[in-house]
Amino acid sequence: MKVTSTLTVLLASLVQTVLSQDQFGPIQYDSIHNATAITGTWSSGSKNVVTGAGFADPVKVTFTYPKTTGVSYSFSDSMHYEIARYRFNSNGSEPTCITGIVSWVHGTYSLNANGSITMTPFPDGFQQIQDPCAAVSNFVEPYEFVEYYKGWRIFLDPNFGPKLHLFQFDGQPVAPMFQVSPTPNMLPTQPLRNIPSDVGKVRRSTSSASSVLDSQRTTVGLLFVGAVAMVLSSLLL
Ligand SMILES: *[C@@H]1O[C@H](CO)[C@@H](O)[C@H](O)[C@H]1NC(C)=O
Ligand SMILES: *[C@@H]1O[C@H](CO)[C@@H](O)[C@H](O)[C@H]1NC(C)=O
């Protein structure tokens, strides 16, 4: 009895798996979503942000700032991706504190059966944050987040050709991107620098900025202690 019920459950779950895969289908072959394949290089707006050489130098951990903000994604047939982003974040409560963020990441992606995309980074991604109002106003940090996109669509724009819409994990759309090239424009699809020492380097450069701050704090602290001592001694006298 027990064996049969276990078997039934097993069979049921197998059927369910087959059904759900059937129901959603491998979306990359669905003509409704694909005016063209997702492979290639895509770029938003004025197309000044483009993946590949000329945006980030992962060996030196530097960026060449594009003329305007935007975002670019590349996807290869070998299931590699690369993302370049340049954006400004404004802060409602501090309108003068506009933060600039430029980031680069690459790795491998999968087109999931339920129409989502999972992007798993190599550990060499990084981003630079410029925040005029922060204690450390300019720093570089590792960027190695797995990104999950709920879905995607490719339409054919009558004037600008294939147009990619990506939807983030929460359904928020990424800025629409146009195809820059049907073949991906990407840096070599492998980790491009030795991470353990480099992450250390990135951390050291931010901590050297904070150690300047620390020594300023120490000076301020010493002055404060001195002032308190003077007040105390004048009270005692
Ligand atoms: C906006 O600025 C305030 C004050 O500096 C800060 O506490 C807050 O975290 C900022 N918000 C964002 C989204 O950056
Ligand atoms: C879609 O599939 C991916 C990969 O299997 C999974 O991680 C994700 O949770 C699924 N999403 C939903 C809404 O079922």
Image (tube, rainbow, N blue to C red):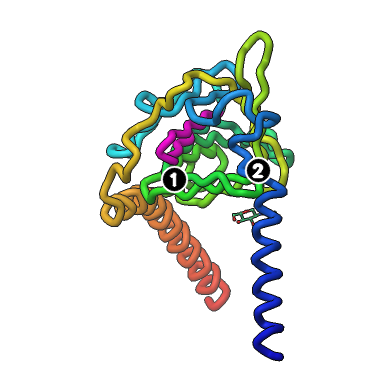
Q: Nearer the viewer, mark 2 or mark 1?
A: 1
Which circle's residue, 2 or 1, is located before the other in the chain? 1
Where on the picture, by quarter, is residue 232? bottom right
For ligand 2, give the image quadrant: bottom right
Q: Which residue is mark 2?
A: 168
Q: Residue at x 54, y 34 (%)?
A: 100
Q: Amino acid at mark 2?
A: Gln
> Is most of the magenta stretch helix, strand or loop?
strand
Q: Is residue 99 magenta?
A: no
Q: Residue at x 46, y 65 (%)?
A: 226
Q: Position of residue 137 (x, y in %)?
A: 48, 41
Judge by depth and name the residue closer to the eye, 79 or 12: 12
Q: Which residue is mark 1?
A: 108
Where on the picture, by quarter, is residue 162? top right
Q: Position of residue 79 (x, y in %)?
A: 44, 41
* Magenta region, residue range: 71-83
Q: Residue at x 50, y 73 (%)?
A: 233
Where on the picture, by quarter, is residue 222? bottom left
| 117 versus 6 height, above or below | above
Q: Position of residue 12 (x, y in %)?
A: 71, 69
| 145 versus 99 height, above or below | below
| 21 versus 29 height, above or below | below
Q: Position of residue 30 (x, y in %)?
A: 65, 34
| Residue 182 relative to residue 98: left or right | left
Q: Amino acid at mark 1?
A: Thr
| Residue 134 relative to residue 51: left or right | right
